[in-house]
Amino acid sequence: LAAQYNADLVIASDGLNSRIRTRYAETFQPDIDTRECRFVWLGTKKTFDAFTFDFVQTEHGWFQAHAYKFDGETSTFIVETPEAVWKAHGIDQMEQAEGVAFCEKLFADRLEGHALISNAQHLRGSANWIRFPRVICKTWVHRLDVAGRQVPIVLMGDSAHTAHFSIGSGTKLALEDAIDLADEFTRHANADVAEVLSGYEARRSVEVLKIQNAARNSTEWFENVDRYTGMEVEQFAYSLLTRSQRISHENLRLRDAKWLEGYETWLEMQARPGTPVKKHPTPPMLLPLTVRGLTLKNRIVVSPMAQYSAVDGAVGDYHLVHLGARALGGAALVMVEMTSPTPEGRITPGCPGLWNDAQQAGFKRIVDFAHSSHAHIGIQLGHSGPKGSTQLGWERIDEPLASGNWPLISASAVPYGEQNQVPRAMTRTDMDALTAAFVESTKRAAAAGFDWLELHAAHGYLLSAFICPLTNLRTDEYGGSLDNRCRYPLEVFTAVRAAWPTERPMSVRISAHDWAPGGNTPDDAVAIARLFKAAGCDVIDVSSGQTTRQAKPVYGRMYQTPFADRVRNEAGILTMAVGAISEADHANSIIAAGRADLCAVARPHLADPAWTLHEAAKLQTRALQWPRPYESGRDQLYRETARLQALNNNDKP
């Protein structure tokens, strides 16, 4: 084509099964992820006045229909189900007409007597049932030598990328590709094709990634419908509407404020049974939660964040001001950073510990202040394992000390990186000694008055190093299978739980995904959560990664929340979501959808100790009590916020 038409540019918009992309795959480097469900694209003369989802349970599992108006007389009707369910019904052995008839019978109530129509009669058997291929290309431009000229071939539309049909953005993405390519030509005055294509790929790849992240969340929701069918119908509907995480709580308010207010009222009735709901229901993130004998006033947690400011393991004035400010800031629970039960278990020389009376006294001072500020406070206990004896966070993070290093222990003699010290594999004697140290720290934490205790079993630290198959190479009963790898962390948890007051809650932080080949996956995270739940854990704090330097996490808004969702709704345990939760809209969406029960907010609390109070002001809700000395500031903030919001609304077209 390039030679025939003497072209300066070839646009490859030849669709999902692009032959051009395949021919030059070495350049484009496509990554094609074939998803779990089978679906068939059908039509019907039954018209739908709105996009309609229908769910039908069979003896083998769930089917769902995605139906929407195609034109004035017909509708598209897509039927989707997990492949295991599809095979269990024998659809893979059916002729096409039999498969269509099966769907007609299954959705007869929705179709109201109308037939389903296939436009794929040329396909034999069940070949019209396919699995969705998610396409991502590393680069979008290939340069072809044509008679001594370099002619670029650029991908566009489905040949470059796909997004699952459940978010309805495939055609939109292709049109936006074309618009942005035309805009790039205008921007560069048609002068430099290389610059045009570089700008096009840079702009579009970012926008496409955002949509594909949303599409992935939506796809996984439909692949796991049975995860959510145990919810009350109200919450199931909310979860469905917000499944992509692009449609948020306040976004729903713009679409249907009356419906959302009704749902908020229902949600508050579940959180406060028997208590009348006021005229304006409480935002989900400000609803109370009771865990064991502790009632948290809302769902916001100040996540444990290393401050590297302790001296010989003892916290001081800095920690009193740091944690005290956040206790005044509206969050229900303030968590102290990872605190070691032994001197050698610290990450850095500036990390806190809890092995002596002076350290306990320093913590009690902070706990007493938090309680006087109507906040609850917790402590995270953990041992650094292979990631210990490193520099302060603002020096060379995770790098060994320049001098004065102490010996390390871990599950196996596997260093965190080539530059890190090789730890010694723990013996049974080491395990017994460390468990006893954890118990002693737990008793000290209880005596200091902490309300909540979290065991750190994530991020490559010692307990995590046992759980992660990349760092646990043991051949005894503490290595190999997941149950074996969790054996020692569970021994520590059981001992700590026995020493911690019965009425006070305990959580465990886990890495739900190692983001590395051969590492733990979200499937493993559910199994890990079930093991800790059986041992008496109340809440799983669901983080991910940091177990190996080879990890390649996929970041984004609330990027770890789907892991918390899965653990909560499959393992049946309360979860704490953490990671890139930065505004009230995120927290409200997470809590309202039942993806997690608590939201741990980290960096935003470093920038703003009163993050929770300020986010509540943006919502103009009075459901959160301010410290009495701050009330005049509260009133001014609410007035100014309301004024600015009114001005912004007036500026909108």
Image (cartoon, rainbow, N blue to C red):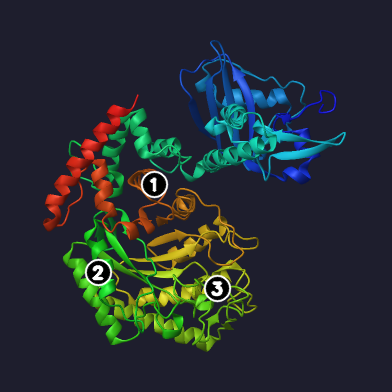
> Marks 2 and 1: CB-CB under 8 Å?
no
Number of residues whose C-alpha sits closer than 10 Å to that of mark 2, classed few (under 14), some (14–19) or many (20 or more): few
- For badge 2, the amino acid type reads Val
The Cα–Cα distance between marks 2 and 3, rounded to whole angstroms, is 35 Å
Picture coordinates of residue 603 (x, y %)? 38, 58
Picture coordinates of residue 99 (x, y %)? 67, 27
Number of residues whose C-alpha sits closer than 10 Å to that of mark 1, classed few (under 14), some (14–19) or many (20 or more): many
Residue ID for mark 2: 321
Residue 132 appears in view: no
Check the image and report above or below for 474 versus 276: below
Q: Earlier in the sequence, mark 1 or mark 3?
A: 3
For image coordinates 26% across by 62% down, the residue present is 326
Instruction: Place residue 37 in its image quadrant.
Output: top right
Residue ID for mark 1: 590
Badge 2 element: helix
Residue ID for mark 3: 466
Q: Earlier in the sequence, mark 2 or mark 3?
A: 2
Q: In front here: 398 or 648?
A: 648
Q: In front here: 557 or 379?
A: 557
**Which quadrant would the C terminus be assigned to in this image?**
top left
